[in-house]
Image (cartoon, grey):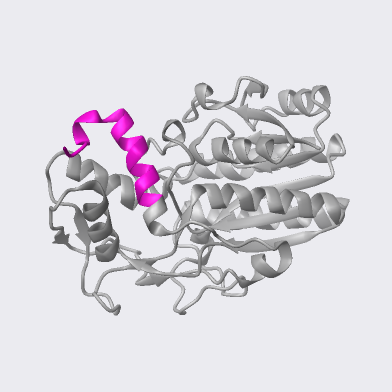
Amino acid sequence: MTWLITGGAGYIGAHVVRAMTEAGERAVVYDDLSTGIAERVPAQVPLVEGSTLDGDLLRRTLAEHSVTGVVHLAAKKQVGESVELPLHYYRENVEGLRVLLEAVTECEVPSFVFSSSAAVYGMPDVDLVTEETPCVPMSPYGETKLAGEWLVRATGRATGLSTASLRYFNVAGAASPELADLGVFNLIPMVFEKLTENAAPRIFGDDYATPDGTCIRDYIHVTDLAEAHVAAARALQASPGTDLTVNIGRGEGVSVREMIDRINAITGYDIPPTVTPRRPGDPARVVASADRIARELGWTAKRDVEDMITSAWEGWVRRHPEAARR
C-alpha cells in the first residue's frame, strides 16, 4: 500500500508518517507547509507542497505515486481562531476535504482515514464519552470536523470508499525531540512556557464539579495515536467497504491541577499554579471510552501521562535550553 498523508509535515502528521514507514507501508506527504515543517519528513519519503483546495495537483499526486489510501490530517485546528474566522475554517477544513474526496474517488483510491476530534462532542455530560454520545460541537472548528465525518461517510456509502473517522482526545508527547509539538496551545506546552519564564502556570477555573475542582481530560500519547492510524489503515485494506468511527483515548481522566503537579515534578520546577476565571465553553470532564477501537482494531494505548510529559519536555528543552533545571 502507498498512503498519501496530508498534513504529514505537522506535529501529528510526522508521527503518522514515522509509524507508517516503520510498519512497512510506503508514505507520500502532501502539505502546504503553512504550519508543517519540511525537515520533519524523512528523506526517503516524497514531499509534495500543495493545498487540499488544489484538485489538479491532488489528482496528479495520487496518480504519479500510485496512491492506494489517504490519511487526511491537513486542517486548521485552533478553536479560538475558528470562532474569529469561521469562513476560513469551513473553506480549509470542509471545502478542502470535499476537493480531496473528489480527487480520491476520481482516481479510484479505495481507502480513506479521516482525522476527526473529540471537539465534535462539545460539552458531553457523561462520565465516559462513547461514539454514540450526541455530537453538539461548540465551535466552528468542531463543526467542521463533524461535517467532515458526514462528508466522508456519505462519500463512502455512495462510492464504496472504505472509511474511518478517528476522534482524537488530548494529544501530547513526542516520539523523539525533533518531532515535538512546537505550538503552545495545549496544556502541557502552555505550562512549559510559564515554567521557563519562572511564572506560575494558569488554571482556568477551580470550581468545577470534579474531585479537585479543575477540568478533567483524557490525554493520549502522539505515538499511540500514530499507531492507531496504522491499525485503522490496515483494517480498511483488509475489509473493503468498511465504515468506522472510533475514539482515540486512554479512557482515563487527569485533572488540570494533577497534570501541573506532575509537570512540576518531572521538570524539576516547583511553581504552584495560579487560578484565573473559567474559560467559556470548557466542559468539566471529557474522557473517552476506548472500548470500540480495542474491539474493532485490537488497539489500546501503551504509554502513560509520565511518558507524555517526559518526551514533550525533552523536545521543549531542545528548543529552550535555558529551561533545563540543573
Q: Position of residue 284 (x, y in %)?
A: 34, 72
Q: Which residues are magenta?
A: 308-326
**Quadrant containing the N terminus in the rendered view:** top right
Identify the residue at horizontal 50%, vertical 76% (top origin).
128
Q: Is residue 257 visible?
A: yes
Identify the residue at horizontal 53%, vertical 22% (top origin).
38
Give the farthest residue toward the front: 326
Q: Position of residue 274 (x, y in %)?
A: 13, 58
Q: Position of residue 238 (x, y in %)?
A: 85, 53
Compared with 147, 217 (above or below) is below
Identify the residue at horizontal 74%, vertical 57% (top origin).
153
Q: Is residue 111 left or right of residue 231?
A: right
Q: Residue 317 magenta-drawn?
A: yes
Which is more toward the observer, 83 or 60? Answer: 60
Which is more toward the observer, 117 or 157? Answer: 117
Q: Is residue 306 left or right of residue 47?
A: left
> Magenta part mainly helix, strand or loop?
helix
